[in-house]
Amino acid sequence: MEWYVASVTIGAARYEATALYDTPSTATIFATVNGSRTVSLASAQTISFDAGACKAVEIDYHNGSAATEGLDAGFKADPIVITIMARQAGGTETVPVAKVSNKASVSMTYNFGVGGAESDSETRTKTDDATASVEIAEAPELPKASLAKTSKVKDENGNEVTGETAVVGQTIEYTITLTGQSEPGMQDPILARGPERG
């Protein structure tokens, strides 16, 4: 199955009061995505990727625009939404995909250093994982569409001529109308002219 990350929406982040810090930090929280794109999280931010260009997303939260800066106490972030596009190849030998699973990991490093102590940069790292899966319908509903074709005959001056028979020098004008009948609508439909029959 072919797949890629189409976009990621990073929820807004902020600081809230804690038992030890009743006045939350007012620092602006930023997020760096995949080590290169940095956005401010005063509000939710959506980052889109080119088709096939992204297979995973790594988000680094930090104060200030530099990813090396840490976070203050009381950090809280709204949910992250990742949109993945997937396509399964057809064919009689293809085994249908029945389930799609995904794993997310989080890692946070805390600095417990105390000024004047033997080491003022003592750190501890906490990690955790979470998994989720989605069942795939056995028979996905295919897109539905209608196709209509009309024609008219015009003379040398562009005037429409009644009747269904054209003579030399006249022009036949076709109009083809493609109407989507599925919800949600089709993505990137292609209308192709096939070989002549008859």
Image (spheres, rainbow, N blue to C red):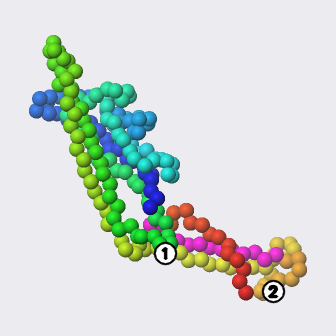
Instruction: Using the image, determine if residue 150 lies above or below residue 121.
Output: below
Q: Which residue is mark 2?
A: 165
Is residue 75 rendered to the left or right of residue 150? left
Is residue 170 rendered to the left or right of residue 183? right
The kind of secondary structure element at disc 1 is loop
- In three-dimensional space, the C-alpha distance between marks 2 and 1, rounded to whole angstroms, equals 46 Å
Is residue 132 rendered to the left or right of residue 163? left
The kind of secondary structure element at disc 2 is loop
- Decide whether residue 172 is among the magenta residues: yes
Instruction: Using the image, determine if residue 114 lies above or below residue 182.
Output: above
Q: Among all residues in the image, which is located at the extreme top?
A: 116
Residue occupying the point 30% across, 60% down = 133
Please say whether residue 39 is visible from this viewpoint: no
Q: Quadrant of the C terminus?
A: bottom right
Q: Quadrant of the N terminus?
A: bottom left
Q: Which residues are magenta?
A: 171-185
Instruction: Using the image, determine if residue 193 lies above or below residue 43.
Output: below
Residue in front for this viewpoint, 29 or 90? 90
Instruction: Using the image, determine if residue 17 lies above or below residue 53.
Output: above
Residue occupying the point 14% across, 15% down = 117
Q: Which residue is mark 1?
A: 92
